[in-house]
Amino acid sequence: MSRRRNAPATQQPPAVHLFKPRAGALLLLTLVLGLSGCATIPGGKPDPRDRFERFNRTVYAFNVKLDHAVLRPTARAYVKLTPRPVRTGVNNFITNLYSPVTIVNNFLQGKLGDGINDTARLVVNTTIGLGGLFDPATGMGLERHVADFGETLGIWGVHGGPYLMLPFLGSSNVRDAIGLVPDYLLLHEIETVQLFDNNEYVEWSLFAVDVVNRRAQLLDLDRVIDSSYDPYAVLRSAYLQRRAYLINGGITPPEEEFPDADMDSGAAAPAAPAAPGEAPPSAAPMSPSPAPPAAPPPK
């Protein structure tokens, strides 16, 4: 009689590892699509830049609920319990970690001076700044820039397409949403994975710290959103104007600009329906890109 060999119980075919993330994404998409019919569009002439407004408002409502339930309370607690010097060090470290994305896109956009400048910043802050915890490069006159692949595509002449509200990530458009993919691959698949030896615990920890850090920087802006008649329209207008400014090199009057994302008063703002990861015009992706960073790849 031949003996039947049983495979170890812990082994699973590759398809099993891919099923859970895909099933979760499918479930989320089904939920959002199912609720999209319930979204209410204010009266008046529709914005021609927002063809998917009903769907976008549904996603925005989902983001708001997530923000109010989890992100904003966590960010307030972080600001309240963490000393400002520590928060500054965390922000410096995260910003330094994202520098390669900016550097690569600077060169792709033909901004050689900015690319060299940001490369020098990365070297100085990584070495003298102890891995990016400190920012001696700014004191040396090396100004920080922010660039992403969506902006690069825009400079190459690719049209932005309709406005798009992304789950968890906030404001975007079709072009910038596509641009998130190469930026994500550059940061997580090349830089972060290699830097931290593919340690998923480190990657998820960095992701969580990054999300809380970015949301904490936007607490003061909740007041602006809370005082507006239509917060969704305010965020849409701010995002589209900012992206046009970055791509076309226009000049935005100071009174039309939101405070920079690096400004952190440390004071908790009153409740406001701001979506998680929503970056007003000058917020640095929340990526340092237009949208907050994507989660580390599931293992």
Image: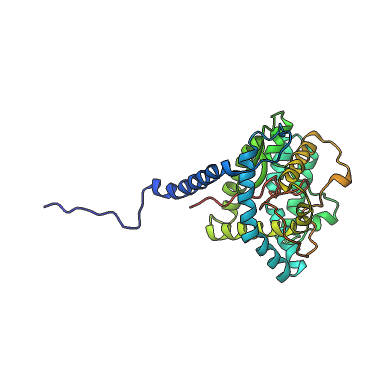
Please, is residue 76 above or below residue 290 in the view?
Answer: below
| Image quadrant assignment for residue 161 | top right
Between 4 and 77, the one nearer to me in the picture: 77
Could you tell me which residue is drawn at 55 percent across and 45 percent down?
A: 35
Between 27 and 21, the one nearer to me in the picture: 27
Is 253 on the left or on the right of 167, as rendered?
A: right
Could you tell me which residue is drawn at 88 percent across and 42 percent down?
A: 253
| Image quadrant assignment for residue 133 | bottom right
- Residue most extreme to the top: 157
In the image, residue 112 lies at what x, y percent?
Answer: 78, 38
- Residue most extreme to the left: 1
Question: What is the count of numbered marks?
Answer: 0
Please, is residue 294 above or below residue 155 in the view?
Answer: below
In the image, residue 58 lies at what x, y percent?
Answer: 61, 45
Residue 166 seen in the figure:
no
Is 225 on the left or on the right of 161, as rendered?
A: right
In the image, residue 103 lies at what x, y percent?
Answer: 72, 43
Residue 144 seen in the figure:
yes
Could you tell me which residue is drawn at 60 percent across and 52 percent down?
A: 192
Q: How is the image coloured?
A: rainbow
Between 29 and 245, the one nearer to me in the picture: 29
Between 199 and 265, the one nearer to me in the picture: 265
In the image, residue 218 lies at what x, y percent?
Answer: 74, 56
